Image: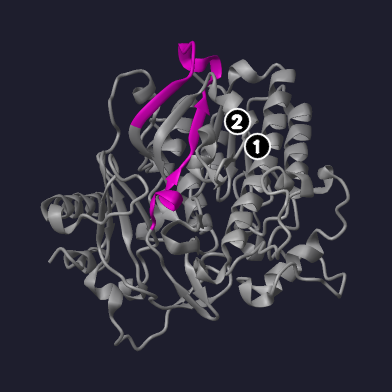
Amino acid sequence: MSCNVLLVVSDTFRYDLFHRRFYVKNGVKAKLNGLERFYSDAVEFTRAYHASFPTVPNRADLFTGRFTFTYYDWSPMPRNWITLPILLKKSGYTCMMVADTPHILKDGYHFDRGFDGWNWVRGQENDRYRTSPLDVRLPCSPWKLRSVETTVQHIRNNYYRRSEEDWIPVKTALEASRWLEENYGRKFFLYVDFFDPHEPWDPPRWYVDMYDPDYKGEEVIYPAYGPCDYLTEDELSHIRAMYAGEATLVDKWISFLLEKLDMLGLLENTTIIFTSDHGFYLGEHGLVGKSIIMGEYHGLTPLYEEVAHIPLIVRFADKLGLKNNMKVNALVQTPDITATILELAGLSELNETSIQGSSLIPLIKGEKSKVRNIAVSTPSLVRSTWAGLRATITADEWALILAPEASVREDVEKAEVTFIVDGEPRILKPFGSIASELYDLKHDLKQEENVIAENIDIARNMRKQFLKFLRSLNAGENLINPWLKCIGLD
């Protein structure tokens, strides 16, 4: 079964961008023609969810096949970790990383460890890449930006762009394509990590005009995280247009990379995996962003479908005998991707891995109907729960947002610092109303009606499964105890 593997991650890529489900505004939907074509003979996992949140912890899950939220938070990769490229090299793979996501590489984070080669395409977000020009014009009022300094840095980093080929996702796709041209005769694992469509949103002008050509207002390319009521209706629609434009740019150049595979004769002996780390709120639930950031303070938001649900498409080498596309509706999570790759490489029995994910291949072959009963999506559990921490537990038809009673304590003496979501230190602090919530996903996919009061037994049973899952991961009692008393359940 051993084959080449191309693993593509696109940061902040919402699952509903596919199948024309993402609305920019009335009558206008996102168009992702390239990856839609990819679907035509691939397997779509319709109920894929991230585990650890956000960017860096997600990559930790992906590189280890483990649910790292029980022992790891946003920080450099520990030197003793056994990672996916280290394991694949034991089976004769040449392992290459091409990435423009800065947070897994800058400041000594070392997620390149274990790869035979790696290429960091510079210039995204707060990457300390350029110091000029000195004078930078902001695209909107500074108070609407999550960080003026980061916005200025990003504009400086990309000031000299002139044609589409100067945009970072294009450079990343071209670097990966060049590597394939030079190495296509080897058995390879190629990991390509696109930061886009993460903000700041600044694709070539015509990608935005595709969705909102008549807009004349300010462009809030790096919006302040939190309640979105500081934006006008037109500004919010334009934010959605800029996001859709960025996603369309990424779609085009991922498609370019896949076409290169085909041209090199690699399509039939390469398994191609496309996924994301999380989504983003663009007005849903009254929010923009994926957290709440107020100056030096950072609050955690519930992980609703728009953030927790991720795309996952796999086109297996030789299609595993599949003649057409296939949809799998079983719950799957990020560590399962790692387990699947190891099985494809013939390494599923390697004892030293301690993989906690489950291979997805039995689902495709019809040998199993599910690999897990619940999906757990959460920020790291290793810090105190008092700053608004909530875990999302997703079952077949239900989503439980679980809030420990300790999440609203105000008598905490020690300030705790977090580095999510961009590597900048901020003090954790709860914001807004914090409560447990339950949603019937079968009838309320937008999660607009909290039905926990009428279904308390269902919520308690899901909490029970969550606690059982934590214990199966060997989580310490200090991590489990806060969840024994939850708002609205006890």
Query: What label does residue 446 carry, if any?
Result: none
Q: Is residue 31 above or below residue 478?
A: above
Name the N-terminal-most of marks 1 and 2. Answer: 2
Instruction: Name the residue tied to disc 1.
Output: 251
Q: State the image coordinates of residue 138 (x, y, percent, origin top left).
A: 76, 70
Residue at disc 1, secondary structure: helix
Q: How crowded is mark 1: few (under 14 residues within 10 Å), some or many (20 or more)?
A: many
Q: Which is nearer the eye, 206 or 189? A: 206
| Residue sitting at x 23%, y 69% | 482
CB under 8 Å between discs 1 and 2: yes
Tell me, yes or no, if residue 347 can be seen here.
no
Residue at disc 2, secondary structure: helix
Q: Which is nearer the eye, 363 or 66? A: 363
Q: State the image coordinates of residue 180 (x, y, percent, origin top left).
A: 73, 29
Q: Residues within 10 Å of mark 2 (few under 14, many from 20)?
A: many
Residue span colored magenta: 303-329
Q: Which quadrant of the figure has residue 381?
A: bottom left
Indicate the amino acid at tag 2. Leu
Q: State the image coordinates of residue 287 (x, y, percent, origin top left).
A: 47, 63
Instruction: Name the residue tied to disc 2.
Output: 35
Indicate the amino acid at tag 1. Asp
Q: How is the image coloured?
A: one colour
| Residue sitting at x 53%, y 35% | 20
The quadrant of the picture occupied by the C terminus is bottom left
